[in-house]
Image: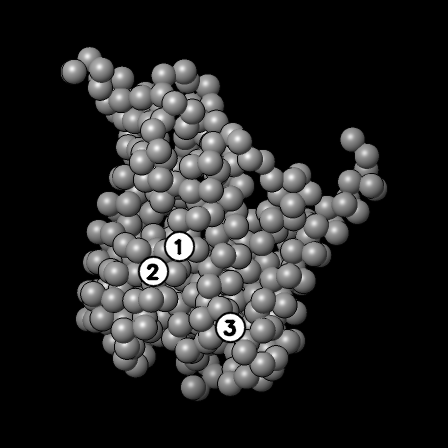
Amino acid sequence: MTYDASLWIIFILLGLCTLLPRGSFIVLGNRVTLPGALQRALRYAPAAALAAIVVPDVLLVGGELAPFNPKLAAAIAAVTATLLWRNPWLPFIAGMAALHAARLLAGV
Amino acid sequence: MVHVHSTFWSGAREGFTVFLPLSVGLVPWALVMGMAMAGVGFTPLQAMGMNVLVFAGTAQLGTLPLIAAEAPLWLILTTALALNLRFVIFSAAIAPGFRGVPMPARWVSGFLLTDGVFAVCLDKMLTVDDPRWRLGYYLAPAVWSWVLWQGFALIGVFASGILPKQWSLEFMATIALIVLLVPMAKVRPMLLAAVVGGLSATLLRNMPLRLGVVAGIVAGIAAGFAAEHWEHRSKPT
């Protein structure tokens, strides 16, 4: 797949979508504060957003629900490795190993 | 002049010493980031362009599949904003540590704010008086993170060119998102936000313009917030 110049516009806008939240209060100083309820609600945004990307990716194959597929096996292995060990490389090793083992078993 | 700047450098030395061992954790992330960007077909220039301009692992990994699927721009940006919202909270928490620091340095510091730097610097930023010492203590780990992030992403970009396609290395990006998600979901309302967010996005996958992702995020936030309220009521403190 190749991308045209509009990719750079996406990068610049993404950069702003990162700089503005990060810079917000550091640049503004103590003059402004967020309402407490909004602050608490925003805490859930990263977890919800990560899950909204990961879960469909590992549950769907070709747009259809596939409760038994190699990606799901890999995800379970990665979650297990993250929960059990602190080694930062292990989830990747376990996940990729499970992905390929499940593919071999399924014959895909 | 020398002694005017010396507190900056003593702060920088101390911040760097504290952060150095922890910074090893950035290496696999940056490598995976590089491989993931090359995996969706970015040229090395495009990959490093994204890495320098965006400099946010979660937002980069999270938007890569959307960019590759040619999702609408607003969806890509909304997703990035949702993934970056935690920085508004970090920024608000650490802001008092930048009193007495000039504006240009504040913009640079904001750009370089990451989860690790926030976690390491927050305490000293709020308790030390000397603004130069504080800025040094913050900037040394922040700049070091940036250097590691760019260097190892570049290695990742070129490593992925050598590795065969059927290894499906692009899946490492999904694993990276899982590794970020799991520690967050150890608190019950956060777990609920993730479960509701993930399942809603899956069930709503056929909504036009991939609106299901945004609907999933909103549903997840609402579920987490509601669960927090409910927990507070059931055991008042």
The numbered dot on residue B21 is: none
SS category of the residue bearing label 2 = helix
In the rendered view, tell whether residue B125 sits above or below residue B39.
above
Q: Residue at x 51, y 30 (%)?
A: A30
Asked where in the image residue A104 lies, by quadrant, the reply is bottom left
Query: Marks 3 and 2, how far apart in space?
Result: 26 Å
Are callouts 2 and 1 both on one chain?
A: yes
**Chain identifier of the residue bearing label 3 in the image:** A
Q: Residues within 10 Å of mark 1 (few under 14, many from 20)?
A: some
Q: Nearer the viewer, residue B69 or B166?
A: B69
| Residue designated by label 2 | A12
Asked where in the image residue B14 lies, by quadrant, the reply is top left
**Chain identifier of the residue bearing label 1 in the image:** A
**Chain identifier of the residue bearing label 2 in the image:** A
Image quadrant in which the N terminus of chain A is located: bottom left
| Residue designated by label 3 | A57
Q: Residue at x 41, y 32 (%)?
A: B120
Q: Are marks 2 and 1 in contact (CB under 8 Å)?
A: yes
In the rendered view, tell whether residue B56 sits above or below residue B119.
below
Give the percent coordinates (x, y) of residue B58.
Answer: 43, 56
In the rendered view, tell whether residue B197 sits above or below residue A106.
above
Q: Amino acid at mark 2?
A: Ile
Query: Marks 1 and 3, how far apart in space?
Result: 27 Å
